[in-house]
Image (spheres, rainbow, N blue to C red):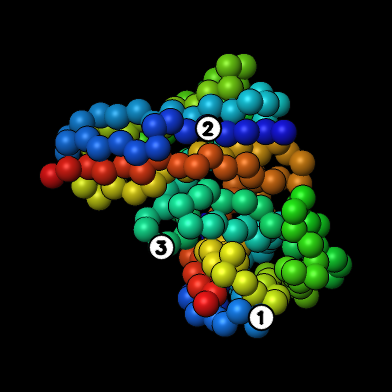
Amino acid sequence: SAVISQKPSRDICQRGTSLTIQCQVDSQVTMMFWYRQQPGQSLTLIATANQGSEATYESGFVIDKFPISRPNLTFSTLTVSNMSPEDSSIYLCSVELKGSLYEQYFGPGTRLTVT
Amino acid sequence: KQEVTQIPAALSVPEGENLVLNCSFTDSAIYNLQWFRQDPGKGLTSLLLIQSSQREQTSGRLNASLDKSSGRSTLYIAASQPGDSATYLCAVSTGANSKLTFGKGITLSVRP
């Protein structure tokens, strides 16, 4: 396994502002993903973070709202832009480790509340 | 489009009971299936991964089985303990960029 850290762990933000969430892994990674978990719901994939290139977004998610960077193999950021109360969720990054046979490991999550 | 269903949404059992959590999926062309545990307000902990060519995996008191042709998986928990109380999520990968499709989870409560 690996140690996956996310910053911040939680935040309360005002409507119309933006928040950037960081994800750092201490092991070699092949894939990195960002998920959203809305209150009382299961996880939904936002995008696959690609190293050195634009992220691959799922249907219903766009780069202007959720810009993602992955400057190297073990670090990625997700920005939630122009926030509204509907963006209140837990945001989680996940990774596939090199040699892990496609098993995914998740970070502790960032709990975002938008007021 | 792959859909994953977990029923019931919640389950309460007395301590010591053996129990089975069910997961079903609509597209049998999966690459693998993972079971996760999520404690309230926390991230996910991977419990077991079953590759599509496998029938079951075991870890301690947990045993997960996979019947790909019928689109079903079960997570068996032996001798349940209050510390097993959590939400258990099933997720399948269809292999396309390893994306996971999740069920809504089963919230388990083990009563002392």
Crowding near pointer 3: few (<14 within 10 Å), some, many (20+)?
few
Residue B63 tag number: none
Q: Which residue is mark 1?
A: A16
Disc number lying in front (2 or 1): 1
- Label 2: chain? B
Q: Which residue is mark 3?
A: B41
Question: Residue B25 at x, y = what percent?
Answer: 59, 28
- Label 3: chain? B
Q: Name the residue at 77% across, 41% down.
A: B96
Looking at the image, residue B8 lies above or below residue A96: above
Give the number of marks.
Answer: 3
Asked which secondary structure carries label 3, the reply is: loop
- Residue farthest to the right, as pictured: A53
Q: Name the residue at 80% across, 70% down.
A: A64
Whether discs 3 and 1 lie on one chain: the answer is no
Crowding near pointer 1: few (<14 within 10 Å), some, many (20+)?
few
Question: Residue A76 at x, y = what percent?
Answer: 69, 71
- Label 1: chain? A
Instruction: Work out whether residue B50 or residue B3 is closer to the camera in this orientation and state it.
Output: B3
